[in-house]
Amino acid sequence: MSGALPDSLPVMERILSRHVTRDFQERPIPEETLLQLIRAACAAPWGGGAHVGRYVVVTANLNLRKIRAVSPGMTGKPSAVIALCLDTGEAEELGLGSGQKTALYLALGAAMQNILLAAQDFGLGGCPIGSFHRGALRILLGLPESLEPVLMVAVGFPTPVDRPKPEPPEPDLSRFTHWERFS
Ligand SMILES: Cc1cc2nc3c(=O)[nH]c(=O)nc-3n(C[C@H](O)[C@H](O)[C@H](O)COP(=O)(O)O)c2cc1C
């Protein structure tokens, strides 16, 4: 399959050009923009139709510094961090308990991707952060027992150092795709 895309496939272009940003400018992100990112997160598909994700947006320098201190995976200095949490209490109440947990994590993953893709529209870059100390983050964010911090997304305006993603090698689709049956 050729790497060339037909004209006017903006979503496909966004998906293919997305890359993580770890070098950020020291520049605040307008609150309205951050809210748009949460809006994008809320538009992700949720199993059972109930959105039990909660998003804690952190922008204050001191709070960001404390989060960096407990997050070995956060190498850059983002202007904002969005902590993606699962409201396990509400999930239980809605009957989306232990059996559905995997589906809820997957939904948060979709919310993460929506945030990353939407960020590009606002000139922002982002990086998912899975390497952080759960217990410490709970304390820093004042999360109740029922809120599970699953993932963070670091966001900010990319520095010029943050180069566009080099043209990735075309994936061998036959390696990943199986038609009708696996074998
Ligand atoms: C669940 C998850 C957790 C991740 N955790 C981290 C992390 O802690 N620190 C980091 O720098 N990148 C993290 N990443 C980003 C990946 O390293 C990155 O997506 C990968 O290197 C591919 O680069 P690309 O997204 O630019 O294609 C994470 C990605 C995912 C999906």
Image (spheres, helix red, strand yellow):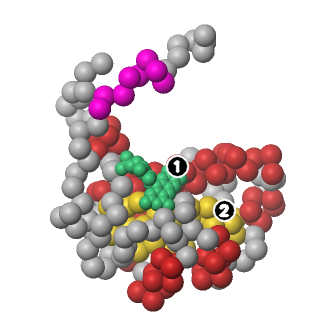
Disc 1 to disc 2, how far (Cα)? 13 Å
The residue pinned by badge 1 equals 110
Coordinates of residue 167 in the picture (x, y in percent): 23, 39
Rendered view: 169 above or below 42: above
Taking the view exactly as shown, the residue that stands out farthest to the front is 72
The quadrant where ligand 1 appears is bottom left
Coordinates of residue 148 in the picture (x, y in percent): 68, 66
Q: Which quadrant of the figure has residue 26?
A: bottom left
Is 56 displayed left or right of 65 in the figure? right
Q: How many marks?
A: 2
Residue in front for this viewpoint, 158 or 108: 158
Is 32 displayed left or right of 41 in the figure? left
Q: Residues within 10 Å of mark 1 (few under 14, many from 20)?
A: some
Of the numbered discs 1 and 2, the one sitting upstream in the chain is 2
Residue in front for this viewpoint, 180 or 90: 180
Quadrant in which the C terminus is drawn: top right
- At x 48% / y 24%, what residue is drawn? 176
Residue kind at label 1, given as amino acid type: Ala
Coordinates of residue 62 in the picture (x, y in percent): 45, 89
Residue kind at label 2, given as amino acid type: Leu
**Res. 86 mark:** 2
**Span highlighted in magenta in the image:** 169-176
Q: Which quadrant of the figure has residue 13?
A: top left
Please, what secondary structure does the residue beneath circle 1 have? Answer: helix
- At x 20% / y 63%, what residue is drawn? 161
Coordinates of residue 147 in the picture (x, y in percent): 70, 69
- At x 23% / y 44%, what residue is drawn? 166
Please, what secondary structure does the residue beneath circle 2 have? Answer: strand
